[in-house]
Image: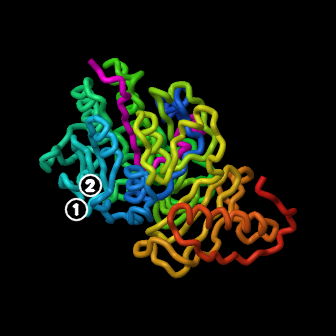
Amino acid sequence: MRNDRPNVVVFFTDQQRWDTAGVHGNPLDLMPNFDRIAKSGTHVHQSITCQPVCGPARSCLQTGLYATTTGCFRNGIPLPEDSKTLAHYFGESGYHTGYIGKWHLADTGPGAVPEENRFGYQYWLASNVLEFTSDAYDTVMYDNDNQPVKLPGYRVDAQTDAAIRYIDTHQDDPFFLFLSYLEPHHQNHLDDYPPPDGYRERYTAKWIPPDLAALGGSTHQHLAGYYGMVKRLDEAFGRLLDTLKSLGLAENTIVLFTSDHACHFKTRNSEYKRACHDSAVRVPTALQGGCFVGGGEIQELVSLIDLPPTLLDAAGISVPEQMQGRSILPLIQGQRENWPKEAFIQISESHVGRAIRTTKWKYSVRAPERHGGRDAGSDLYVEEFLYDLEADPYELRNLIEAESHAEVCQQLRQRLIKRMVEAGETAPAIETATKQASGQRRVSLE
């Protein structure tokens, strides 16, 4: 007889923009399965990563701790040996735990991950850096015995097939499955976004998000392939949902769809992420099953750091006190008091930066004398960006030097410092940008 504890599946994509979803205004019907659960389940309308780069974001989602807390502030830094992950917490509560796909939290090379670096996952079919052990039609991952396994089909389908096999063989267990895709991340050795055959052609010369249309970057070279990858991911998501339904597991399985960060197509710096802009930090997030059925649309800002405590809470597992996010279940229940009014973002590798995003404002600072790949933080930052997201949702007009917005900057500066201290950082000094008169009236945070 099945245990009544809900199963949990995390469907985790890599480098996916929020506006690939129809519920966020994309007109191309790329994600009908995601859109469906966003409407019938719980949709996190403003979902913001706390670290717009692969390894650090994964460290946050696995541990519920900021990257500066674990020390995994850039790619290539492994999880500390004493880390406790979601797999540990679910495993200690009687769940079978499985991991399929990209790990990016070991320093043992791109392929096999030794058991001691899997942090509680019992079933293992993964590569540490999947982009270096696979290609679109050449998927190689490593099993529990560290043996290479070549899987047939397009990479998204190969991973999904493996996930379906895992679910089918663990029907009678409460299970926690973390399914980590590489798509729609670029294929590094090609600097391209290779979709399934025939999918690039579907989306050539189609709708372009306003920021990409205005700023260019690599958009015209890469967007059609990127959209094709997103389409195939959503088709795979539909297959996963069909599997749960056919096995009678849909009602008692919580499914989370989210991504580590987004993609700005070389419009904000010389590559695709590591920026404070929504094109790098805002991702699609929705949940279904269990307590998330009919949860509606959450308008509050939700950070990636809030998802680990949310999953534990939804499964009836006590949320560890050391986790630095908070469960969104109270929001679903209408309890909105004391929820943070901003999302906090740490930026590394490209530079050392910090930012907050409110429903109206984006405020970001940069450390002038720190190296993003060497330094986790700084005691000195300089104001760099201010955007009015209501008037300028695609962040095309930087207001950081506008004298009319000096008071807004002052208030946001204090809020950013407060969030940095709450995350365990030392309160820094922040130098103000030179303000210039613009002839605009003064504005407030309201």
**On the image, numbered disc 1 is attached to which residue?**
109
Instruction: Please give the label number shown on residue 97.
Output: none
Instruction: Please give the label number shown on residue 128.
Output: 2
Q: Which residues are magenta?
A: 1-27
Q: 155 or 61, which lies in front?
A: 61
For image coordinates 55% across by 63% down, the residue present is: 268
Instruction: Please name the amino acid that badge 2 sits on.
Output: Asn
Q: Does residue 13 appear left or right of residue 275 in this picture?
A: left
Would you place residue 355 above or below residue 436 in this image?
Answer: above
Q: 334 or 219, which lies in front?
A: 334
Rate crowding at label 2 as few (under 14), some (14 to 19) or many (20 or more) other CA atoms within 10 Å.
Answer: many
For image coordinates 40% across by 38% down, the residue present is: 317
On the question of residue 112 being in view, the answer is: no
Q: 45 or 199, which lies in front?
A: 45
Would you place residue 432 above or below residue 153 in this image?
Answer: below
Q: 348 or 290, which lies in front?
A: 290
Task: Pinpoint residue 405: horizontal percent, then vertical percent.
Answer: 78, 65
Task: Pinpoint residue 275: horizontal percent, then vertical percent.
Answer: 53, 62
Q: CA separation, marks 2 and 1?
A: 7 Å
Task: Pinpoint residue 435: horizontal percent, then vertical percent.
Answer: 76, 75
